[in-house]
Amino acid sequence: MGWEWLFKYSLRTFVYGDLVFAGLGAVWWLAAGLLLALGIAFARRLARWSLARRMTIHGLQFAAAALVLVLIAAPALEIMRLAAGVNTVAVLLDTSASMALPAANGGETRLAAAKRLLGDAIETAAGNVDVALFGFDNGLRRLPADAAGAVDAVDADGSNTRLLDALTDLAAHHDQSALAAVVVLTDGADNSASDVDLEALAAAAVPVHPVAIGPARIDGDVELRTLTVPRLAAPNTQVRARLAIHHASGGEVQVRVRDGEAVLAAETIELDPATPIVHKDIAFPSGTAGLKEIAVELVASHDDPLPANNSRTRLLEVAESRYRVLYVEGEPRWEFKFIRRAVAEDDAIDLLTWLRTTPRKSYRQGVAHADELRNGFPATREALYSYQLLILGSLPASALDETQHRWLEAFVAERGGSVLALAGRQALTAGGWDVKPLAQALPVALERSADEAPAYASGEYAAEPTPAGLALGFTHLGGVAGDGLPRWQTLPKLADLQRLGALKPGATVLLQARGGSGGGNGGERGLAPLLVTQPYGFGSSAVLATASTWRWRMRTLPDDDRHSLFWRQLIRHLAAAAQPQRRVAVAARGTALDMRVTLKDARFQPIVGANVTARVTAASGETFETSLEGVGADGVFGRTIAAEQDGIYRVDMAARLPDQLGPVQTTTTMARIGSANVESFDAALNESLLRRIAEATGGRLWRPDDLAGLAEAIAYSGAGIRERQRLPLWDMPFLFLLLVLLKCVEWSLRRYWGGI
């Protein structure tokens, strides 16, 4: 038996309505009813019954009398609902390309399901209010008044879905009669790269009722959800691509990295069905200089129902970048000599060295003029900040004054540079660095041992990368990317190891040493940290706990390049992580180009008041200029411009600084606008976004097979022009059935107990 048959109105009507009594003015009816109830209650014929039986009969009589009084009082519901003929319900139909996908795993398309719902349920739910039909994909558009004909002509061919923009635009600019509610037939996709501003949407005070169309998961689908590739790389180096793979059913998949038709790297991975998102790093060679469009694609071992989301492309600019590196060494040793030899083969590294040969003599190499490094250390903070990487050898802390020690810590924390501390007889704790500011930046605690065992001791140790180290391109000593471990296993053993203190919370062990007496702070016996890094402030620091990597050169064949490859890649990796004095970023956000530039002076303080301009060259060759304004923090300038044409955009940024600072050179960067098959990515139902929209606006998320309450949700919504209505309740079948039931129960009990 249905609810509305018993109670006349739906449950939602009772939720939104207020109970009132229209007949309470007839006081004599109440008095008569009360006297009647008292007369029945104290009938003498029940005096011979027990108290329990009398109370049961009296309760039934009182309930029946009260029900009669309720009927006499004429109960009714007062409710505010939409006025007929003066309100509009907007129905938005998603016409983006993702709506051409199946509504379920097989069967009709999502657009076909939406058209069917529009004809069968949505217009019926709107009731006696007007329906304004809209379509949306890249933008919002009004469909003709002839809804049936308009819907038949709609195709799912939009290249983007701008759901939030369409809703905001509708709420702000709809010029018809009062907008009472919005119904959206969609799969929840929104790939416009807009920020999710639900507060602005909620401020319109119009409830949005999304109808969720599409499957929550696509069986068998393997998708390259995200792809991150560095914007800039040096020639002939290893580049790391970071990707996130979303899958529905597990299985085996091959990852390929391509530059045009050339395959740069390939790796097969197993997808765990219990882990729907798998993060993976894959290294590939950068190759020669030039602008390259790197493609990463997934090849599944099974039939993929949506192969269009298996690949993504990114721009990679391969260009020569010169790194200024300062190496300060406190004593002549083999490590110093062979590091210089390894780096000398790399034209991208400017290595300046200062070596103290005796307590009163030093030797400088690579300096640009006679005064550079005259005292063994940069004389000013600006001179120190001109380097990207500082290497500290076996140098006691007493070689520097207190001001220079503060500069060193600030070099990492404020300038954003990198520091590499090497092991040695006068390095780290043995050199007194544990009481200096730089100790705060290092990835390990510099602790003095309670026993008398030396922190730096000889032994035989094999070096090997950790899983975290293998994920970084610089640990691959040639060969096929991703297969770096075999070339490590045949390296000659190291001859010494620095015992390190406890790892700090942000530290990462990239290389470990196996052998010797073990110890250290490694968890497995015979393992100790060898190369440890951590971020600190704006920069990073590293500790290499050995001074005998020269063995990798001296104890191998003349054509073995692993030693030089290791040092060149390590230095490039650390130096490239340093913050540049000017940082330019250009990103594609839908059909817009977002430009940002950060400017700092020689002391790496933000520059305020610069005049920054950008010359933008579109894919068609059209060129125009625009100025960038200060945004957010000091020293940051930016602007977002429309970019309607798909293709590669070139941006040349230049800044004219305040007169006392001089001009900044022009910086060029590039970005791609537009992406093929963007609607194929994240193609499953985005229920979370639709639910957030409904909750923020006071609407409700609906399923295509359960739209029974949509009409009342629209009728009783808080928006639009409403009128007060009084709905009588006295003739509800439930009340009369209850009255009959009460009297039947009383009669049955009297008969059973012998009191009739």
Image: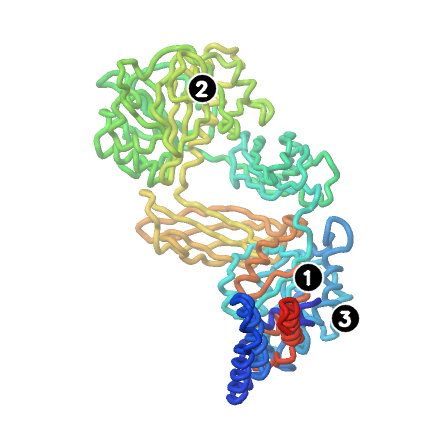
User: Which residue has dot 1 on it?
Assistant: 706
Helix, strand or loop status at disc 3: helix
Q: Could you tell me which residue is drawn at 40 percent across and 15 percent down? A: 518
Q: Position of residue 328 (x, y in %)?
A: 32, 25
Closer to the chain start, of discs 2 and 1, is 2
Which of label 2 and label 1 is nearer to you?
Answer: 1
In the rendering, which numbered label is found on residue 524? 2
Name the kind of residue labelled 1 in the image: Asp
Q: Could you tell me which residue is drawn at 46 percent across and 51 percent down? A: 596
Closer to the chain start, of discs 3 and 2, is 3
Q: Is residue 413 above or below residue 542?
A: below
Q: Is residue 335 above or below residue 243?
A: above
Estimate the spatial distance between the alpha carbons at disc 2 and disc 1, rounded to whole Å.
59 Å
The front one of 288 and 434 is 434
User: Which residue has dot 3 on it?
Assistant: 148
Q: Position of residue 647 (x, y in %)?
A: 62, 50
Q: Is residue 502 left or right of residue 235?
A: left
Q: Is residue 639 left or right of residue 101?
A: left
Q: Is residue 302 above or below residue 3?
A: above
Helix, strand or loop status at disc 2: loop
